[in-house]
Amino acid sequence: MNKFLILIGIGVSIVIIGLVLGTTSDIDTPDQTSQIPPQHLVAIAMSSSRPGCESTGCYLPTQIQIKTHETISWINEDRGFHTVTTGYYDTPDGMIESEQIAPTEQFSFTFAESGEFHYYCRLHPWMEGTIIVS
Ligand SMILES: [Cu+2]
């Protein structure tokens, strides 16, 4: 009788272990979150309103590489207003124009086409960055 109970106990244990392992392996399978393209962050550096950030980067990182359909969000970590404007100073190309981004605010743009895009801040010509979309 005792041996019979032990066998039942072993059987129940195997079923429980199987359920636990089955549940665990479900967690390992790819879920919806892996389907969302990664979002890239670029910080607008503190004190970018004054010349001098060029040496360390006014937009951090100054150059960023992404893939098409991915999004970049620029976060203004400075105390002044800034823009993200594609083109070169005084000759914006019209692709991206964030308008003025207030301190602590952010601006996002999703890139549909590949290419290399130069951008700057309309308020501070020394602020420059490059986006490479492949
Ligand atoms: Cu600026």
Image (cartoon, rainbow, N blue to C red):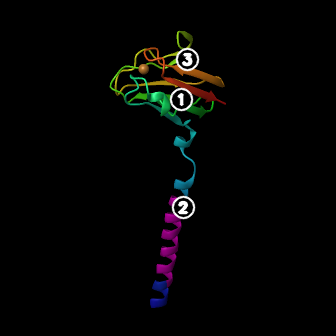
Amino acid type for the residue under numbered disc 3: Thr
Comes first in the chain, label 1 or label 3: 1
Where is residue 97? Give x, y as percent: 49, 15
Disc 2 from disc 3: Cα separation = 51 Å
Comes first in the chain, label 2 or label 3: 2
Amino acid type for the residue under numbered disc 1: Thr
Q: Secondary structure at mark 2?
A: helix
Please report the residue visible at 50 percent of the width from the left and 79 percent of the height from the top. Answer: 10
Where is residue 25? Give x, y as percent: 55, 59
Which of the pair 39/61 is nearer the observer? Answer: 61
Q: Tell me if residue 103 comes above or below residue 21 in the rendering.
A: above
Can the viewer see residue 1 in this picture?
A: no
Q: Secondary structure at mark 3?
A: strand
Task: Name the residue carrying label 2.
Answer: 22
**Magenta-tinted stretch:** 7-24
Task: Name the residue carrying label 3.
Answer: 86
